[in-house]
Amino acid sequence: MTNTARTILITGAAGHLGRAVAARAHAQGARLLLLDRDAGALQRAYGDAEGQVAADLLDRAALAAALAPQMERAGRVDTLLHIAGGFRMGEAVHETSAGNWDFLMDLNARSFVNVAAVLVPHLLAHGGGRIVTVGAGAALKGGAQMGAYAASKSALIRLTESMSAELKGQGVNVNCVLPSIIDTPDNRAAMPGADAAQWVHPDALADVMLFLASDAARAVHGAAVPVSGLV
């Protein structure tokens, strides 16, 4: 299954990584469904391109309603590249606020459960497909003032592994990438003294994700692939 003439659903499509992945997938000939909660951000990123879907991943019913006509129009969605997520740090575990805990667990774990609830039955009805999620290298081991973030991304990795175990016999490959620091304007602004050349460029991470979504990775199930650059 190459990316040519496939339909790929990208969540978090208006973000820096989402735009890089969309550009790579489009260059390979894929049709795109570009999902983000911010319709204005989608418009700014993609102009009048078709396939834009504005929906809140935390509202399963609204998500299903927004995706249904696009999925019907596409006929078949082959691949989910789940990029949507969030980052916060700065609180010790014993000081973690309910708001930050809920924010991170919602964006990094519940969002995936919701989009999977909408898309997986479609994939199974059409004979299978590919799912790639974006975890984090920081989720492999807890770090100071990063407990809630690490826990939320670790939850996403475990969900990815569990889904792989559930679906690999039904033609669905489910895998995860684990970036270190992604080279984005936001990260450069937050860490002005860091050597961004050591980080992972969004295009490089996009290449790994699209490999996992391709026929070349047809034997890969439940993998959590480190994409750490030189960090």
Image (cartoon, helix red, strand yellow):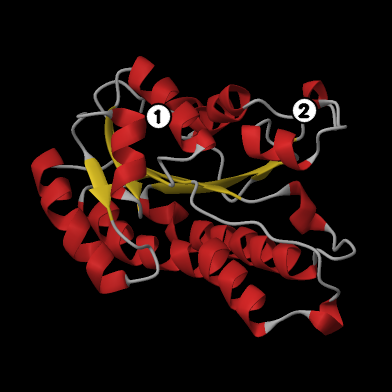
Q: Which residue is mark 1?
A: 22
**How far from the left and from the top, in percent, is residue 166?**
47, 64
Q: Which residue is mark 2?
A: 229
The image quadrant where one finds the N terminus is top left
Taking 97 as reference, is 58 left or right?
Answer: left
Q: Amino acid at mark 2?
A: Gly
Alpha carbon distance from label 2 to label 1: 21 Å
**Residue farthest top in this picture:** 27
**How far from the left and from the top, in percent, is residue 171?**
37, 47
Q: Amino acid at mark 1?
A: Ala
Given residues 131 and 86, the one toward you in this image is: 86
Please, is residue 120 above or below residue 8 in the view? Answer: below
**How far from the left and from the top, in percent, is residue 88?**
69, 61
Q: Dot 2 lies on which element?
A: loop
Q: Circle 1: is it few (<14), some (14-19), or many (20+) Cα within 10 Å?
A: many
Q: Residue at x 65, y 84 (%)?
A: 98
* Residue 123 seen: yes
Please, is residue 102 above or below residue 132 in the view? Answer: below
Taking 15 as reference, is 189 left or right?
Answer: right
